[in-house]
C-alpha cells in the first residue's frame, strides 16, 4: 500500500513542478516559447492521466471530510488525527467513569436489596452463580 502512496506522491510532485514551470512560461510568454508551452501542456495532460491511474489504485481509501476542512483552513491534517485521538481518550475516560459509577450503584443496590429482601436476593444470587453470603 505504501508503494501506491509513494507513486501518487511522486506523480503529484511532478505535476506541481510542471504547473510551476508552465506558470513561468506563461508569465513571460513570447511567441518563440510556443513550442515549450505546448510541451508543458502535453506534460500536464500526461501528468493528470498518471494521477488518474493512481486514483484507480487507491479507490478503497476513505478520507474524512473534516481532513479537507483542516486543509482548507490552512491547518496541518495530522492535527485532525491528534485531535480525534484526544477526543476518543476523553470520551473513553467519560464512559469509564459511567461504568465505574454503574458498578458501584449495582453493588450498593444489591446490598440494600439484600437487607430488605434477604430470601429473594439469596435466590437471585444462586441463580447468577454468586456466593449468597456476599
Image: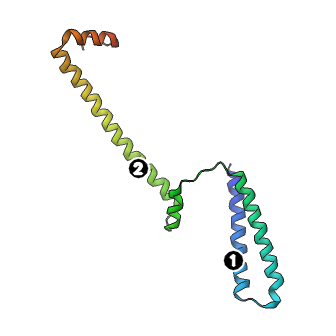
- Residue 41 shows in this picture: yes
Residue receiving disc 1: 20
Q: Which quadrant, please, contains the C terminus?
A: top left
Point out the tag, 2 or 1, that comes first from the N-terminus.
1
86 lies above or below 125 = below
28 lies above or below 77 = below
Q: Position of residue 17 (x, y in %)?
A: 70, 73
Q: Please rate how many residues cluster around mark 1, counting C-alpha atoms within 10 Å: few if below 14, some from 14 to 19, many from 20.
A: few
Q: Position of residue 51 (x, y in %)?
A: 72, 61
Q: Position of residue 80 (x, y in %)?
A: 48, 56
Answer with left or right where residue 115 lies relative to residue 21: left
Q: Residue at x 29, y 28 (%)?
A: 103
- Residue 131 shows in this picture: no
Q: Please count the marks in the image.
A: 2
Q: Residue at x 31, y 36 (%)?
A: 98
Q: Residue at x 25, y 10 (%)?
A: 122
Q: Residue at x 77, y 69 (%)?
A: 45
Residue receiving disc 2: 87
Would you identify the image quadrant in which residue 52 lies? bottom right
**Secondary structure beneath label 2:** helix
Task: Residue 115: give its label.
Answer: none
Between 90 and 42, which is closer to the camera in this rendering? 42
**Secondary structure beneath label 1:** helix
Answer with left or right where residue 27 lies relative to residue 74: right
Amino acid at each position: 500500500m505504501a508503494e501506491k502512496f509513494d507513486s501518487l506522491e511522486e506523480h503529484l510532485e511532478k505535476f506541481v513542478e510542471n504547473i510551476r514551470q508552465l506558470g513561468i512560461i506563461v508569465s513571460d510568454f513570447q511567441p518563440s516559447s510556443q513550442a515549450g508551452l505546448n510541451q508543458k501542456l502535453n506534460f500536464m495532460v500526461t501528468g493528470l492521466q498518471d494521477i488518474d491511474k493512481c486514483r484507480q489504485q487507491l479507490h478503497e481509501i476513505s478520507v474524512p471530510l473534516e481532513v479537507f476542512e483542516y486543509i482548507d483552513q490552512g491547518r496541518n491534517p495530522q492535527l485532525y488525527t491528534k485531535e480525534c485521538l484526544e477526543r476518543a481518550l476523553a470520551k473513553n475516560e467519560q464512559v469509564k467513569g459511567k461504568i465505574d459509577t454503574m458498578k458501584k450503584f449495582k453493588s450498593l443496590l444489591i446490598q440494600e436489596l439484600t437487607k430488605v429482601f434477604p430470601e429473594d436476593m439469596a435466590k437471585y444470587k444462586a441463580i447468577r452463580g454468586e456466593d449468597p453470603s456476599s
